[in-house]
Image (cartoon, rainbow, N blue to C red):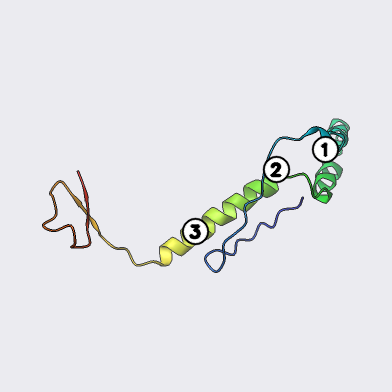
Amino acid sequence: MAYIEASNFPIDIDDLPFVSDVDLAHKPIMQTHENYLSNGEYTLASSYLDSQTDITPINAGLLNLIENRILSTQEYLLTLTPVARCNYGSEPASPMDGTIWIE
């Protein structure tokens, strides 16, 4: 499976791929992948896994996907106006004054 690394946040919610261990039905796919790696054919091994729709590998594509989503979230948060809503050490006069009290 090839990852869509670009993030749509905050316009849309990004899908997170499901990652799990390989089951017996997909063992031949992983054996072929391991054979490519053992022979030093790394590009072929990567493109082979990308062509398999039932396999979600943990590779650079997944890490880039996660990195881009974190970056999109950070960039969005930087566009927000900071709001000081926490008071430390003293109880607010009223619980309805829009503050959060942290002891």
| Callout in the foreground (2, 1) | 1
Residue type, numbered disc 1:
His
Q: What residue type is labelled 2?
A: Asn
Mark 2–mark 1 CB contact (< 8 Å): no
Residue at image point 52% right, 66% down: 10
In what element is the residue under mark 1?
helix
What residue sits right under mark 2 in the picture? 59
Spot occupied by residue 57 in the image (x, y as percentages of width and height) = 73, 42
Of labels 3 and 1, the one closer to you: 1
**Label 3 SS:** helix
Task: Please report the residue visible at 68 percent of the width from the left and 38 percent of the height from the top.
Answer: 20
Would you name the residue on which mark 3 appears?
73
Measure the alpha-carbon separation of dots 3 and 1: 35 Å
**Residue 36 in the image, given as x and y percentages of width and height:** 87, 36
Q: In this view, does 58 lie to the left or right of 82?
A: right
Q: Which of marks 3 and 1 is nearer the N terminus?
A: 1
Looking at this view, is 42 or 8 the one in front?
A: 8
Q: Is residue 30 in sight in this rendering?
A: no
* Residue at 82 percent of width and 48 percent of height: 52
**Residue identifier under label 1:** 26
The first of marks 2 and 1 along the sequence is: 1
- Give percent across and percent down for residue 99: 22, 58
Secondary structure of the residue carrying numbered label 2: loop
At label 3, the amino acid type is Thr
In the picture provided, is 21 more to the left or to the right than 103?
A: right
Taking the image as shown, residue 35 lies to the left or right of residue 70, namely right
Q: Do the residues labelled 3 and 2 touch (CB within 8 Å)?
A: no
Q: Is residue 56 visible?
A: yes
Quadrant of the image occupied by residue 14: bottom right
Asked if disc 3 and disc 1 are in contact, CB closer than 8 Å, the reply is no
Q: In the rendered image of this protein, does residue 80 appear above or below residue 32?
A: below
